[in-house]
Image (cartoon, rainbow, N blue to C red):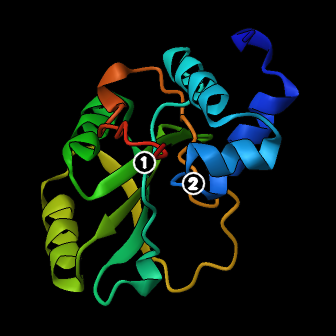
Amino acid sequence: MNIEGLDKTDLQILEILKDHARMSYSDIGSAVGISRVSVRNRMEEMEKAGVIQGYKTVVDPAMVPEGMKFFIDMEVHPEQYEETLERLAQSDMIRQIYGVSGDCRIHAEGFAPNQTQLRFYANNFFRTMKGCRRIEWHTVVTTYKDMDGGVEFVRYQESEHLEGGTRGKEGPSE
């Protein structure tokens, strides 16, 4: 298999995995016209090459009785930028952090288990954050479209300390 130029079958496997990461090797093989052993071998090669970095379960926050997705948009003084990124990265509630266009602007996405914990986190963050020029918090009420569709795409970041969390290695069953 040529990893640098994934072939048509590899791309078909990846397309199936985007929506059905728990599908068996046999079922994937039937869908793309190869044996389950060939599917397993191709997936293992794609894992080794870093094309596939893990498998996960996606929980729709709107379906969880308690819990909410939220966004933070902030503009900080240049001398506090790295410290702010570090602080956001250390929080278990923060899932993604982006540097966005503008003067030292940061966009972060998070998930809080409930309203009380989000309120506590926000109040603590506001009280103790130094060098913040502007900050806005928003909670997600409704998701109308999610192009990622449950796939965790790698978000390239300049600093390794921002790469949070671990990706599970559980994949399809035989």
Residue 15 visible? The answer is no
| Residue that numbered label 1 is attached to | 96
Furthest toward the right, the residue is: 8
Q: Is residue 51 left or right of residue 10?
A: left
- The tag on residue 23 is 2
- Nearest the camera: 132 or 141? 141
Q: Does dot 2 land on a helix, a strand or a loop? A: loop
Which badge, 2 or 1, is on the more N-terminal residue? 2
Label 1, residues with CA under 10 Å away: few <14, some 14-19, many ≥20: some
Position in image of residue 85 (x %, y %): 32, 37
Q: Is residue 109 left or right of residue 52?
A: left
| Badge 2 amino acid | Met
In the picture shown, does residue 141 fall above or below 16?
below
Position in image of residue 112 (x %, y %): 27, 71
| Badge 1 amino acid | Gln
Q: Report the residue at 36% width, 31% height from top.
A: 163
Q: Is residue 77 left or right of residue 115?
A: right
Q: Is residue 166 left or right of residue 41?
A: left
Position in image of residue 81 (x %, y %): 35, 33
